[in-house]
Every structure is written in structure tokens, then in C-alpha cells.
Image (cartoon, helix red, strand yellow):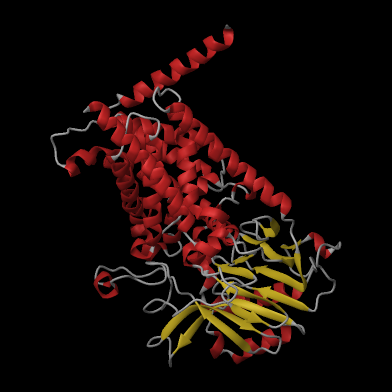
Amino acid sequence: MAQPDRREHDASLLERLAGWVLLLEGWRRVVLTIAAGALCTFALPPYNFPAVGFVGFPLLVWLLDGVVVDPGRSLIRRMAPAFVTGWLFGFGYFVAGLWWLGAAMLVDAAAFAVFIPLAVLGLPAILAIYYGLAAALARLVWSDSALRIFALAGAFALFEYLRAILFTGFPWNEIGVMAAPAPLLMQTSSLIGVHGLTLLAVIVFSSPAILIDRRGRGPVLVVAAALLTFHLGFGLWRLQTHPTEFVENVRLRVVQPNIEQSQKWAVNQAETIFERHISLTEARNDTAAIPGATIALSPDTTAPTTGAMSPPPQTLVVWPESSFPFLLTERPDAIARIAETLQPNETLIAGAARIEGPDIETSRVYNSVYVIDDEGEIVAARDKTHLVPFGEYLPFQEFLEGFGLTQLAEMPGGFSAGAARAKVSLDGAPSFLPLICYEIIFPGEIDVGTAETRPGFLVNDTNDAWYGATPGPYQHLRLAELTSVAVGLPLVRSANTGISVVNDAYGRQIGGLALGSTGTIEVGLPRAGAATLFARFGSLPFWLAFLVTWMAAVVSRLRMRARID
């Protein structure tokens, strides 16, 4: 008899907690809602503690249960309390998850420190509108059934999708990321993408809220448990049945120079920065060559693994975004130095500013990737197509410059967007798709589902030095890893100050360098996986799952109305 009494006691505690949350008013309700959103950020990198989702989302469900709606008012007025609840939750989530954006304003504090409140509070306030609209939409089909968490999941997934595409898109820290703290839990993204993970995450995280429900609790809890079991089981199966394999005769040398952002474009540091890249490239497994540098070796450097050869005839050297503190095409001496450094069958993939026109003041400047062969010839170039607003260019430039605003990048007029994204073919190695900086957080824009467009691996060259030792670089890495797993391609990531990694197509790290360290990663090139469901069909599987979820919520709402009528 002790066990039933214990269950009843636990249910009673949960009911009392839910009742207390439902009846909250005024500032206490505001504080709890913001805190619930902020708590959820501990599921994100670098904390990676998804259990907080089982607290934050049940609180949100109960807070929405407690929304008072006057049926005599207009639709907008009826939805306003739910919107405010969702907005407060989102404001807490985005402030706690994006506060590190303020660090970028301190690189040139004299010019940009005044804008810290806009970055730390203004942007979260805008992004929170998506969550406010999601809560309002969910409340529109809310019911007294446990299926109301399907309404919440569908609404959040829909507005996370919209957040990724509207106004150039900003899908940073989507709720689905909370459900993917490790490779085991990333694999579901290969089926339904990160938007689908959001759908799954909200259902699973919200499930404790319905433990006290009387109507429809059992089936919904079974669905939530089944989703969690599938999420874990599919990840385990995929990792166990797809061991890491390497491309024969190809190796990688990923350089992490660790240049502080305050020095990155200093004229008097240009040669020092360039020579650091050169020295790290020349080190080649010699840990004593660069004082304080780290050489991260893969297992196949010292022992045979699938497809590995020693020494390999082809080496790909990868430098980070904006590696050159000058325009490379105006420095034939630098190109000659690169040719001198690269050994036969070594190819350099490096981030660089590329100019079209007579001078930097009147020409188009692109944030690009150069491919340079061992004779110093630039054999390919690709331009960044998805630029960072306010970072690489200033929207409504003439208008906003009148208020003293400029983009963070030290480039007259900002960068121009490239015309198209395309893979780069290499001699003696698989092709690759360059994704510069935060281009990699937009998996929906990456066309890699057909034989014609599919490369052998992804190259993400980036510079996260703007954000220092904050959660920002860890979050950026996680988003890159999720894109890699979603499309089933290895990730080769060179980040100026970190975090540089080489991952296989399933998110397993082959080699990496810590944030703030200097060094190189010497590893084999992992082999590409088969085109995933997401790579082939994009968001279609997500939309099918969304429709099923949303229809279940709508039917529950209609049944409730029928009972009332």
C-alpha cells in the first residue's frame, strides 16, 4: 500500500504546484515566466543539460492554462494575454541565451559600446515576438485535454520555422537544439531537421505538465514516451551501424591561429598574423615548431584505420574566415610565400576578402573562400551568400548611417552578397561545400540532396573571436554540427580562436581544438554518409509531422467546444 500512497502524494504536490502557477498574477507571474524561459537556456551549449526543459515547458503550459480570456472581446484582445506570456518566456530565453552578443560591441568599445543594450535586450525583445505569437496561436486551439501540448509544440515549431526565414532569418538557439546535446541525440535531425526536433522537444519537455490531467493523459504520455524512445533508439542504432570511415589518400590540416579580434585588422600586425598562419601550416605534426601550439592528431595518424594511408599523397590545409589581414590578390609576395609553404599535393582552403573593382572604396567586396594549389595559383573562389545584418552589412544603410550606425565589419560600405552557392571540385580529393561563418546555421538553404549538388564534405570557416570566452562559440559549433548531421556530411571547421573541429557525418568528433588555443588538427578526411531524408526532401517530413500534431490539437479543441455547447 505504500507505493500507491507515494504516487498520490507526488500527484498532490504536482497539482498544488500547477494550481499555484495558474493563479499567479502581477509581477510574480512576470518573473516566473521570464525565469522559465531563461532556465531553458541551460539545455544549450556550453551547459548541455536538457533536463531543465522538463521544468521550463511544464511551467509555460500551466502559465498558459492560467490565461484569462474574455469571450466578449475581439480575437486580438482575447489572444493578447497568451501573447504576453509567450513573449515574456521568449524574452527570458533569448536574453539568457544571447547576452554574449554584447561582447562583440566591446571589441571597438568607443564606437559600439553604446549599442550593447540593443544587442543584449533589444534583439531578444524582437525575437521574443515569435514566441509570443506561438503562444497566442496555441491558445487559439487550447483545450482542457492533454492534447493541448500538441498545440504548443505545433505553434512553436511553426514560428521557429518562420524565425529561420523571415527578415533574412535568425534560427539561433532554436528550441530543437535543446534536444540535441550530443551525437546520440542529433541523429533525428537527419530525418526531420532541427524544426522537427523542436516539435519533438516541446511535446516531450511539456509532458510532465499533463501528469495531473484527467482527460486524454494516457495516450499523450504514451506518444511522448514513444518519441523520446525513438529519439534515443534511432541515435543509438545510427551510430552503431555507421562506423567512421576515411577517404583514402586524403588528409586534413586544420589551422586555428587564435588571433584576438582587436588585432585582426591592425595594419602593424598584418605580417605577424600572416606568418602565424604560415608557421602553423609548416608545423606538420611537429609540436615543438610553434611555442604554445597544440597539434591534435587523429587515431589514424599513428595506427591504421579504415581507408587511411601514411603518408597520404593529398593534404587539404584549411584556414579560418578572413585569414588574410589584407587583400591577397594585391600581395603577390604573400601568394609566393604560400606557394613556398605548400608541399607538393597540398591545397590551401582559406577565408579571404575578395574585391571586384579598382579599389576598396568604390568596389564590391565579398567575404570569400579561396582555394590555392601548391604552385600558389588561386584555382577557385566562392563568395558568402547569406550575410550577417549589422555585422557584415547595414540594412537601410543611408538611413541608419544618419543615426551614427555602421556595420561591425571594418569594410567601407560593408560586404556584398555572393550570387550563388556551389560546391568546389578538387583534384585527388572529394569536392566540398564552403559555408562561411553563420551560413552553416541555415540547413534549409543547403542543396546537397542530389548527385549533382552533393559534395564530399562541408567546410565551415569562421571567426568567433568577436565573442571571446562566452557561450557564443559553443552555440555556433552546435548549430554547425546539427547541420552536418542533418545532411549527412562530414564537418571540417576552422575557427580563428576556436572551436575548430573535424567531425564525421554523424557528429562524432575526429579531432578538435579548444576555444582560445593555438594549433592545428591533423586528421584523415571522414567519408560522406548517404544523403539523408532531410537532405533529399528538406522540410517536407517536418511539415507532415506538423500537420498530424496540429490536427490532433484542433480536433481536441473542437471536441471540447462540442461538450460545452
Judge from the rendering whether residue 33 lies leftward or rightward of residue 506; answer left or right.
left
Picture quadrant of residue 307: bottom right
In depth, the one of 229 and 504 nearer the eye is 229
Q: Is residue 402 left or right of residue 31?
A: left
Residue 279 vs residue 125, the one in the foreground: 125
Q: Position of residue 308 (x, y in %)?
A: 81, 68
Which quadrant holds the N terminus? top right
Q: Based on the displayed image, in which of its 4 quarters is residue 3 positioned?
A: top right
Report the number of numbered marks. Answer: 0
Quadrant, the C terminus: top left
Question: 505 left or right of 283?
Answer: left
Would residue 398 appear left or right of 235 to someone viewing this image? Answer: left
User: In which image quadrant can residue 329 be found?
Assistant: bottom right
- Residue 343 at x, y percent in the picture: 76, 83
Does residue 205 appear anywhere in the picture?
Answer: yes
**Residue 295 in the image, given as x and y percentages of width and height:** 75, 63
Residue 564 vs 258, above or below: the answer is above
Tell me residue 376's x, y (percent).
Answer: 66, 88
Residue 440 vertical placement versus 217 (above, below) = below
Q: In front: 6, or 330?
A: 6
- Residue at (77% x, 61% y) in the render: 298
Q: Is residue 95 visible?
A: no
Please report the residue visible at 35 percent of the width from the left and 46 percent of the height from the top.
Answer: 131
**Is 20 situated above or below 100?**
above
Residue visible at 34% across and 61% down? 166
